[in-house]
């Protein structure tokens, strides 16, 4: 199948599965599509066991593995999704919460990587450096999943800003940490840094360079938009910023996800207030909400079908269950320690640690990073455990975090 045929198939299936969810399951849209695609995948696998001569599972597996999920997400969809998410986070709200957001997106990601990596190495006997790679790819929360859940939960504004802001930035930071650790674990397959100083310099170059590029490109786009009053052209400019800026960041070897977030924040706040008419604001907002919903649907559909690319075995299933606990422990450390450091100097919402721990959903980015690893004896186990953590996170945590937040908001003396 060529690219157009695959794209058409994904959109058709996303629409069909979305309709099934809307009519029968009534789950949140993205989670519902994931559940339906998982059920369809397991149905095909079950039918293949009953009627092996049909070869349905093999054909679907051939199609799924023929789609480079890692490239499709990391080099295509991710920039648009991050830009769309950042457009709806206001700088004023983020400015009030910048310190906990920064600490959780940096120190938090590193702590989670360490907790998960050490635990995974002890659990499996995997070399520590490779286990830390697993820790780095499973530690970032997925802004696509998190922002989708936030739309369903009625959270206090300060808490919502912490969760949204952290999910946008820790994704980019986690990607940088992943690249550095892959360079150390697989010399010759990625950037390699031999000393602590080189690692720190590479981190600053990737993360800081991405932020600077996003701010510069966002500001230049804003200056152009101020001189234009044509909503179709201004929508096109924002689309060019998201696409072109992301690819430029990849070319310059700086963090493309952080570039997309910074550019989106600037356009979504400064750009909408000072560079757009009311009509343009409505069209830009509507266009990017639509892009966000469509790409969300396609992404969660693809996650559901990636079950065909995962090798399940009894040992791997048990390790995957243990990995879910490890991922939650790492997330707890990523949230609780930065908040404990800040608690003497500022107050926090009730239940913030529990809500942010349970609401730190993993998603397609973790699966894409696992798929992008060089081939080796440990890759199938890493991929299986990653997939199980992501599925548990999106379905179980995603469907319960809103009710958890509502329950904790009624309990007066919780943190």
Image (cartoon, helix red, strand yellow):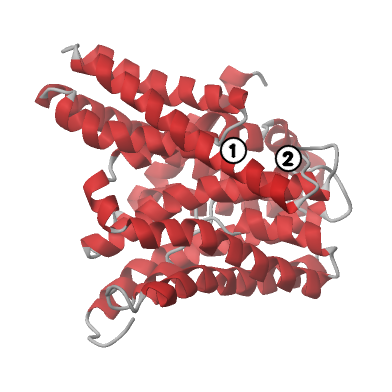
Query: Are dots 2 and 1 in contact, CB under 8 Å?
Result: no
Considering every residue shown, the one lying at the far bottom of the view is 413
Q: Quadrant of the N terminus?
A: top right
Where on the picture, by quarter, is residue 247? top right
Considering every residue shown, the one lying at the far right of the view is 377
Question: Which residue is found at the position 58% from the left and 74% from the top?
Answer: 329
Which residue is more in the foreground, 62 or 263?
A: 263
Question: Which residue is found at the position 65% from the left and 18% from the top?
Answer: 2
Question: Which residue is found at the position 84% from the left and 65% from the top?
Answer: 126
39, above or below 375, in the image:
below
> Could one spot residue 133 in this view of the protein?
yes
Q: Which residue is mark 1?
A: 205
Badge 1: few (under 14), some or many (20 or more) residues near its Cα, within 10 Å? Answer: some
Q: Earlier in the sequence, mark 2 or mark 1?
A: 2
Q: Nearer the viewer, mark 2 or mark 1?
A: 1
Dot 1: element: helix
Rendering coords of residue 328 (x, y %):
56, 71
Left or right of 237? Residue 34 is right
Rendering coords of residue 58 (x, y %):
77, 40
Dot 2: element: helix
Left or right of 245? Residue 282 is left
Give residue 61's mark: 2
């Amino acid at each position: 199948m060529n690219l157009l045929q695959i794209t058409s198939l994904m959109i058709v299936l996303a629409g069909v599965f979305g309709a099934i969810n809307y009519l029968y399951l009534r789950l949140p849209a993205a989670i519902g599509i994931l559940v339906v695609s998982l059920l369809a995948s397991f149905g095909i696998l079950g039918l293949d066991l009953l009627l092996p001569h049909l070869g349905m599972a093999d054909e679907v597996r051939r199609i799924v593995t023929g789609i480079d999920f890692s490239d499709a997400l990391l080099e295509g969809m991710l920039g648009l999704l991050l830009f769309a998410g950042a457009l709806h986070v206001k700088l004023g709200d983020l400015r009030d919460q910048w310190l906990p957001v920064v600490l959780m997106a940096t120190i938090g990601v590193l702590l989670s990587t360490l907790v998960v990596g050490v635990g995974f190495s002890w659990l499996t006997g995997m070399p520590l450096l490779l286990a830390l790679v697993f820790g780095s790819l499973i530690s970032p929360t997925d802004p696509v999943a998190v922002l989708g859940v936030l739309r369903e939960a009625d959270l206090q504004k300060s808490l919502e800003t912490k969760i949204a802001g952290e999910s946008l930035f820790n994704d980019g930071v986690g990607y940088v940490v992943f690249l550095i650790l892959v360079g150390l674990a697989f010399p010759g397959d990625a950037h390699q840094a031999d000393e602590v100083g080189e690692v720190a310099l590479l981190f600053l170059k990737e993360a800081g360079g991405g932020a600077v590029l996003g701010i510069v490109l966002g500001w230049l786009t804003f200056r152009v938009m101020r001189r234009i009053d044509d909503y179709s052209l201004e929508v096109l400019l924002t689309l060019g910023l998201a696409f072109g800026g992301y690819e430029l960041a990849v070319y310059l070897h700086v963090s493309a996800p952080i570039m997309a977030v910074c550019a989106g924040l600037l356009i979504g706040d400064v750009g909408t207030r000072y560079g757009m008419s009311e009509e343009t604001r409505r069209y830009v907002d509507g266009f990017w909400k639509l892009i966000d919903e469509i790409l969300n649907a396609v992404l969660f559909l693809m996650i559901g079908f990636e079950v065909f690319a995962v090798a399940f075995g009894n040992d791997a299933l048990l390790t995957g269950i243990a990995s879910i606990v490890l991922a939650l422990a790492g997330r707890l450390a990523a949230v609780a320690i930065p908040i404990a450091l800040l608690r003497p100097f500022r107050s926090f919402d009730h239940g913030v640690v529990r809500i942010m721990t349970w609401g730190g959903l993993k998603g397609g980015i973790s699966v894409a990073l696992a798929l992008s690893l060089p081939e080796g004896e440990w890759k199938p186990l890493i991929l299986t455990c990653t997939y199980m953590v992501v599925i548990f996170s999106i379905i179980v945590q995603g469907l319960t975090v809103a009710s958890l937040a509502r329950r904790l908001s009624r309990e007066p003396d919780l943190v």
